[in-house]
Image (cartoon, rainbow, N blue to C red):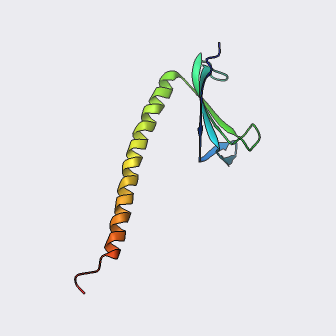
Amino acid sequence: MCTSIVEIAPAEGMAKREDEWFALTHSVVAYDHARHALLGDVITLDFINDSLPPGARAGVELTLESAKALHAALAKAIAEAEIEEAERADSIARQAAARETPSLAA
């Protein structure tokens, strides 16, 4: 039985098929019966460029437990990346402010 659970999100990045990389336009996350994995229902991730032929996709089928672990790892990496980006932006702002402030030694 199909679950009809499908989420689509825009995606900007690159994916690889065979020997070539291609730009992404969107990603599809679904929960349905496996097409290739010898499993029951799975979380399917498809990374797609809809302006290229149908083979321009990178697909993954994960068990629900594996998808949960991936979700947790993504959440942690995203949180850490946001801290890194904030620190980088703060450093750039401090450097710009230092260049704009006249030196008291002159």
Residue 24 figure quarter: top right
For the C terminus, which image quadrant? bottom left
Q: Nearer the viewer, residue 73 or 102?
A: 102
Query: Where residue 86 sits in the image (x, y, percent)?
Result: 37, 53
- Residue 11, compared with residue 101, is above or below; it is above
Q: Which residue is drawn at 33% across and 70% down?
A: 97
Pick the front one: 79 or 96: 96
Q: Give how far across and how far down residue 20 sits, in percent.
A: 69, 47
In the depicted structure, whether residue 93 falls above or below residue 84: below
Q: Quadrant of the N terminus?
A: top right
Q: Which residue is drawn at 38% across and 52% down?
A: 84
Q: Height in image: 88 above or below 58? A: below
Residue furthest left in the image: 105
Q: Residue furthest bottom?
A: 106
The total number of labels drawn is 0
Using the image as rendered, state which of residue 11 and residue 71 is in the foreground: 11
- Figure quadrant of residue 76: top left
User: In the shown orientation, is residue 90 left or right of residue 70?
Assistant: left
Q: Where is residue 34 in the image (x, y as percent from the top left)?
A: 63, 21
Q: Hey, which quadrant is residue 62 in on the image?
A: top right
Q: Where is residue 93 in the image (x, y as percent from the top left)?
A: 36, 64
The residue positioned farthest toward the top in the image shown: 1
